Amino acid sequence: MGEVVSVKVDRRTKEKMRRFSNVNWSETIRDAIRNRLNQEELKERHLDLRELQEASKIADSIRKPSPPGWDSTAEIRKWRDSRGRKL
């Protein structure tokens, strides 16, 4: 069982939340807290989330698709076999 944390919201927000009763608001709040904790932990490690996202975009932009018909499993096997013969 987890710990209990109370959250106060203004009346208008609570009314809007009631309109969307299908939403699991407890889980939504837990997710928001987890996300914020992750951001704070990144800050502690001196990592900027925006820099990480930018680096990811750059990596995605330079990544080239595999040629048609290329079999990664066969390629790995080829290189592993070639190393085994030289040892």
Image: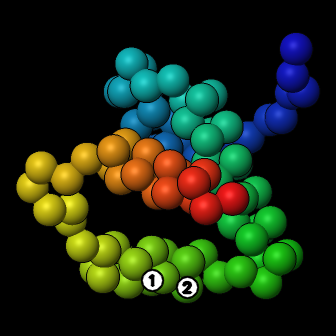
Place of residue 7 in the rendered image (x, y in percent of width and height, measured from the top left): 73, 40
**What amino acid is labelled 1 in the image?**
Glu
- Is residue 73 placed above or below 87 in the rendered structure? above
**What amino acid is labelled 2 in the image?**
Glu
- Nearest the viewer among 56 and 26 is 56
- Disc on res. 51: 2
**Residue at the limit of the structure toward the left, as seen here:** 68
Q: Which residue is drawn at 25% across and 47% down?
A: 71
Place of residue 60 in the rendered image (x, y in percent of width and height, measured from the top left): 33, 73
Q: Which residue is drawn at 48% across and 82% down?
A: 55
- Disc on res. 25: none
Quarter of the image where the C terminus is located? bottom right
- Disc on res. 54: 1
Q: Residues within 10 Å of mark 1 (few under 14, many from 20)?
A: few
Q: Residue at x 45, y 83 (%)?
A: 54
Confirm whether residue 50 shows in the render. Answer: no
| For the residues bearing labels 1 and 2, Cβ distance under 8 angstroms | yes
- Nearest the viewer among 42 and 86 is 86
Quarter of the image where the N terminus is located? top right
Could you say which quadrant of the image residue 28 lies in? top right
Q: How crowded is mark 2: few (under 14 residues within 10 Å), some or many (20 or more)?
A: few
Q: What element carries label 2?
A: helix
